[in-house]
Amino acid sequence: MSLAQWISLVLVCALGAAMPGPSLAVVLQNTLRGGFTQGVVTAIAHALGVGVYALLTVTGLAVLMLATPTLFGLVKIAGALFLIYMGLKVLLAASGPIVDEQPPAQASRKSAREGFLIAFLNPKLLIFFTALFSQFLHADLDWLQKGILVATVTVVDGLWYCLVALLLSHGLVRQRFTQHSLWLQRIFAAVLILVGLRLVFQSLGKVAS
């Protein structure tokens, strides 16, 4: 893998990570709720979830999973239900400012779990990485180069969401967001629920056809 190829990989991964969606909503929610620490915990756990799919892709297991519609569909539905579940939790809690009253250790475990699952229960990452890595994977690719691919994807994703947590935890920025926390919680909930419902209907439509 040449330096130019690696730079193109970094740019594509950065653009993919920066796309708004459920992952961003969860990182924002946890940062507003627990500050920079909880935002970073969520970001790192999310990156590990993304890294799992990158590893599955370079080992060839992604092709096997994509060739098993039942397994792929089950993970997809599980992810959709998890999004709806999280959205409902946020919606039910949207009655006041975003405040985390849990002990730090418990809050960190919760943030890590949410960050990891929001990535791990998104099997579309398999499709993304299969397409992205197609220009890099070949028979002569050694494990060092495969490790570089996985590490690049994981680190870029983690750095992006850590940057989001850093920016949002800045005093003035966080104060502005906190002033509108009620509406923000409702928006986060709507994003999670609507994306989850869309995935459910898509899955059911494919089964029916």
Image: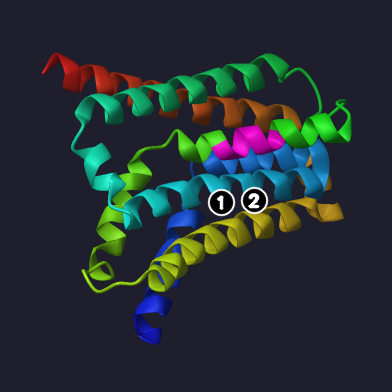
Does 125 lie within the magenta span?
A: no
Magenta-highlighted residues = 111-116
Q: Give the quarter of the figure containing the N terminus.
A: bottom left
- Chief SS of the magenta region: helix
Answer left or right for 9 relative to 64. right
Residue at screen point 51% across, 31% down: 191
Type of amino acid at the residue the image marks with label 2: Ile
Residue at screen point 49% across, 40% down: 119
Type of amino acid at the residue the image marks with label 1: Ala
Residue closest to the eye, 172 or 29: 29
Answer left or right for 172 relative to 90. right
User: Element at badge 2?
Assistant: helix
- How many numbered discs, if any? 2
* Residue 49, x across and y down, in percent: 52, 44
Q: Is residue 96 placed above or below 177 in the rendered structure? A: above
Residue closest to the eye, 133 or 178: 133
Which quarter of the figure has residue 197?
top left
- Residue position marked by numbered label 1 in the rendering: 47
Q: Give the quarter of the figure containing the C terminus.
A: top left
User: Element at badge 1?
Assistant: helix
Q: Residues within 10 Å of mark 1 (few under 14, many from 20)?
A: many
Residue at screen point 80% across, 48% down: 37
Q: Is residue 180 visible?
A: no
Answer left or right for 10 relative to 73. right
Which quarter of the figure has residue 12?
bottom left
- The mark found on residue 44 in the picture is 2
Which residue, as the protein is rendered here, is positioned at the far left? 209
